Image: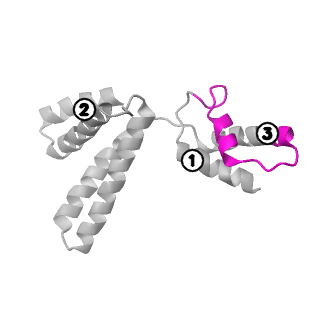
Amino acid sequence: MLLKIRKDLKTAMQDKDKNKLNVLRALLSQSLNASKTNSPIVTDMQMLALVRKNAAASKQAAAEFVEAGRQDLADKEAEQVRVMEEYIGEVKTVGDEEIRRVVGEVVEKLRGEAGEAKLQMGEVLKKVFSKEVLGERNVERADVARIVKEALAK
């Protein structure tokens, strides 16, 4: 994803697309800043989380601009969100149905081992994210946590 953003940055420069250029520069800047911390962005899922975070912030800003009566700035933020959503769709993640299937299997297995003891969400998540289950696949952790919570409530 980072390579695509860099390539698209060059294209945006050539096309003189200021809005896209500003969005891509901001994303690359945040990625570079993250590389200087304890948690650098190395996977597509981490980059996807960064893009989603920025898109949410831009949506919030657009709503605030509309409230303040600044439609011009709200339109600018909406355009930035549109650019970011192009990249959000680029990364293929595991679907909800696949996650539900895997979580269901793990919960059944752990319930069989635990007997009458109540399962803890942490131990289910640990097993789901282990290498042999979902370890290396692109999956949104928040979605998995939500599905595990639903499965444990049953």
Q: Which residue is the extreme one toward the front?
A: 38
Residue at the image point whose x is 32% and y is 55% from the top: 57
Badge 2 is on which residue? 8
Q: Tag 3: residue type? A: Leu
- Residue in the picture at 25% in, 29% down: 6
Residue 58: x and y in percent read 29, 55
Q: Residues within 10 Å of mark 1 (few under 14, many from 20)?
A: some
- Residue 143: mark: 1
Residues in magenta? Answer: 111-135
**Distance between mark 2 and mark 3 Cα atoms:** 46 Å
Tell whether position 145 is magenta.
no
Tag 2 near tag 3, CB within 8 Å: no
Q: Which kind of residue does numbered mark 1 sit on?
A: Asp
Judging by the rendered image, the residue that carries numbered circle 3 is 110
Q: Secondary structure at mark 1?
A: helix
| Sequence-first disc among 1 and 3 | 3
